Image (cartoon, helix red, strand yellow):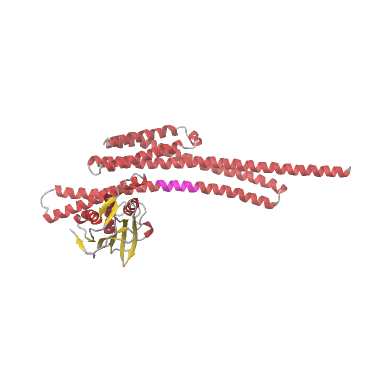
Amino acid sequence: MGERKVAGRFTALSVGAIASMVVLALAVLFANSYSTGQVTENARSLHSANSLLGSSAVLRAANNQAALFARDAALGTASTEARDVAIEEATRALDTFNDVYDRTDPHLVEQSPALDDVVAAMSSSSSQAMELASDGEYQAAFDALETDFEPAFQTARTELRNLQTEAMSAINETETLAGWVAAGTRFIAILLLPAVAIIIYRRIVRAQVRERRLEFEAKLEYERKLSASKDELLAGVSHQLRTPVTGIYGMADLLADGGGVDPETLQEFIGLIRREAGDLDRMVADLLATSRLDADAVEFKNEPFIVANAVEKAVAPTRKSGARVSASLDDSVRAIGDMDRVVHVLRNLLSNAHKHGGPEVSVGANATTSGMVEIVVEDNGAEPVDETLLFRDFAHGGSGALTAGSVGLGLSVARRLAQGMGGDVSYSREANRTRFTLTLPALEQVEQPERVEVEVAS
């Protein structure tokens, strides 16, 4: 009888211990799931607020940029094509903004009932402003942005920042609650589980919370950097496009003032206007090419052409601006490609050589035994600061601001256009000279005569 009582008590204690462990395990599972769910929900709201805030800032910058280009186009200082590109960029920014809002966490919208009206006001005023800009009514577009879009933007920014603060506070509160629950769980576990199991569990929970927090912080930092990069890019491109326009205006005003300009000075002014207009045309062409390449909308009409003709066509604007280029060419060298695109590539390589290289610039071409044609543009300038940045979008030599007359797209566009024609653009440094080599498929293998140096100068 006594043994049965002992066995019964032992069984009861065992069942109680097992039940307690199960309850403890369930409690731990519930607490972990609850805290993780709360952190995830609040982090999702925080991410939505960050994304919406960033896309609204990009939309604001794109709207202002489009209105500025509309004004410049109306005043004749910018082309209608450049204006249309800016308006298209603003329209894409609006589509992105609306898409981000459509995917916004419903919990975030519930916390701010006024957000719907503010977003609708921003969207409608932005669309109205772009329509006015397309019609050439730039002042009306500026007014729409100032009176309708800007107040809605400021309200949205204030509201979203408040929601960011609330989401972060909620995350902190959830973590605090999770801490208290974990403390109680540990107190109970000390009575039932080995200390090692407690330590392992504690570390797992903390690692999970820390990992999620780091992940959301990384996403937040990425959104901030993306918004800052977009604003910086728009400001830089706008400034660089205005630089040649300012030069053209200045020379035109001096010529318009009339009397007293001798023929030599007149030719100098004309050369400056040509050079500034060439820089402006090249920058706009690079921006359009980048946009079309990104959209996979560039069509290549690859056909046989004489390399010397393409080089002459690319060198002509440089010659008119007074720069000197020596050429080593032969009419028998023929390649396959889109000649207009080839001229674009060569103009970019020549411009890069004149802006960043030395005074001695030369162009040569020859067919290789591997069935390719090499067109080499080289100069005696200094070695690039960082070779890894040469072919990146919006990259340039040095660490300062963009070089005047450049948006940092020349070499990137040149390589991408060359690759679209089945070739490439590569960099090398030989005998203290910088070489950029454009390779294209050769039309045929021919014997190359002795190279003759010809000076091309104004």
* The stretch drawn in magenta includes residue 221: yes
- Residue 283 in sight here: yes
Residue beneath the point at 37% across and 56% down: 389
Residue beneath the point at 38% across and 42% down: 58
Q: Position of residue 170 (x, y in %)?
A: 54, 41
* The stretch drawn in magenta includes residue 306: no
Where residue 10 sits, quadrant-wise, is top right
Q: Quadrant of the C terminus?
A: bottom left
Q: Quadrant of the N terminus?
A: top right
Residue beneath the point at 33% across and 48% down: 290
Residue beneath the point at 76% across and 42% down: 15
Q: Position of residue 179 (x, y in %)?
A: 61, 45
> Which residue occupies the foreground of this view, 274 or 126?
274
> Which residue occupies the foreground of this view, 226 or 164?
226
Question: Magenta region: which residues?
Answer: 217-227
Q: Position of residue 167 (x, y in %)?
A: 51, 41
In this rendering, is residue 62 above or below 345? above
Looking at the image, residue 170 sits to the left or right of residue 443; the answer is right
> Which residue occupies the foreground of this view, 275 or 174?
275
Looking at the image, residue 232 sits to the left or right of residue 162; the answer is left
Dominant SS in magenta? helix
Looking at the image, residue 386 sits to the left or right of residue 106; the answer is left
- Residue 405 in sight here: no
In this rendering, is residue 398 above or below 122? below
